[in-house]
Image (tube, grey):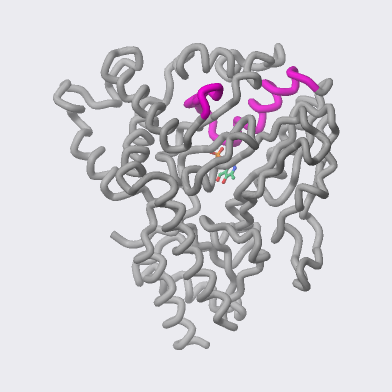
Amino acid sequence: RPWNFSAGPSALPLEVLEQAAAEMTDWHGCGMSVMEMSHRGKQFMQIRDEAEADLRELLNVPADYEVMFMQGGATAENAIVPMNLLGRAGHGRADYVLAGIWSNKSHKEAQRYGDIAVAASSGEAAQIDGRQQQAWTWFPEPQAWQVRPDAAYVHVCSNETIGGVEFVDWPDMAALGAADVPLVVDASSHFLSRPIDFSKAALVYAGAQKNAGPAGVTVVIARRDMIGHALPMCPSAFDYANVAANQSMFNTPPTYAIYIAGLVFKWIKRQGGVQALENANIAKAAELYASLDDSQFYRALVHPRWRSRMNAPFFLADESLNAAFLAESQAAGLLQLKGHKSVGGMRASIYNAMPLEGVRALINFMQDFERRHG
Ligand code: PLP
């Protein structure tokens, strides 16, 4: 198969696709496809329970956190989070850290539900470590966040998929003078690529369609005290209390997507777990960024401290070569390298399912392209 660098939905491990294909019409000899099973039957209950247990094991999810499989994607969580959390504390207030397109979308949506402020933003050029950084190519340091001490929560997107900015030094909120303000994290595009420190985050959500499975299921992992405070306007199917109390079966869950996610979780376990994948992701990103840094022909604009291991946007110094780059890379079996339309240029998304071999194929192609066109 060609190497697929899509930002999402993105490549899944071939083993998972092959297993799903083999089980497609008859799951484990029960005579049904997973798509055809009642979500309340014993076969699907087993699939769901194993998916949750495996995910808990992979991420070391503490016992006082609920794991929920929801629908609507991370975009729906942009509304579901404020509708569930603004009633908890803070007189309907919450604060958002802005570092790219996804956190801006979260902030905009939340404004429909309460008194929402910007805690910090990277939407301006900045001089950092002697480097001139453009807007949205860096991440505001936690010490600079202006968090209202009585806010119901502070929200960050820990991996801006489009800008390629990754933020992992999640703060201890007490050190920011906001000990009672829980951190809420949109981790969609680096979920399962590295361990998660749940002592720092009270709620983490992620659309599945990058590292965790197909589009259609959204994983929400929430500390129990975040649950049970939904505003009256919150649809019952989106009230975490209902979702958690019913093991994500308050209504029909996205059964097939949960099943495939469960196969991905088992694949991750076979790889040696999230720590093993993190090691592989460090190696992959290091080679890719080193090759970008070595070249005058390509440019990576994100400050090295916040370069995403998952999504590497880059630009050709001569943008008139963009169309040729895309056509030739596709012909060479390197798919979906076009950058997001809001940023332009190129973007290589190198999620868990992309092996080092695929990254090296990209690097080789880029070096060859540079030799021929540079
Ligand atoms: N947040 C991040 C970081 C994303 O990458 C995406 C989608 O790519 C979203 C939110 C929106 O997710 P969805 O399309 O599943 O609603």
Determine whether 372 is above or below 23 in the image.
below
State the image coordinates of residue 292 (x, y, percent, origin top left). 54, 74
State the image coordinates of residue 270 (x, y, percent, origin top left). 30, 44
Where does ligand 1 appear, by image quarter? top right
Q: Give me the residue at 46% from left, 57% from top.
A: 281
Q: Give me the residue at 50% from left, 27% from top.
A: 71
Left or right of residue 364: residue 172: right
Q: Give me the residue at 58% from left, 19% from top.
A: 240
Quarter of the rendering occupied by the N terminus: bottom left
State the image coordinates of residue 171 (x, y, percent, origin top left). 71, 43
Left or right of residue 288: residue 151: right
Left or right of residue 196: residue 215: left
Determine whether 269 is above or below 42 in the image.
below
Chain part drawn in magenta: 62-89
Determine whether 290 is above or below 157 in the image.
below
Q: In the rendered image, which quarter is residue 17 located in? A: top left
Foreground of the two, 373 or 164: 164
- Residue 18 on the magenta segment: no
Q: Give me the residue at 62% from left, 34% from top.
A: 199
Determine whether 76 is above or below 294 in the image.
above
State the image coordinates of residue 330 (x, y, percent, origin top left). 39, 67
- Residue 81 on the magenta segment: yes
Foreground of the two, 308 or 113: 308
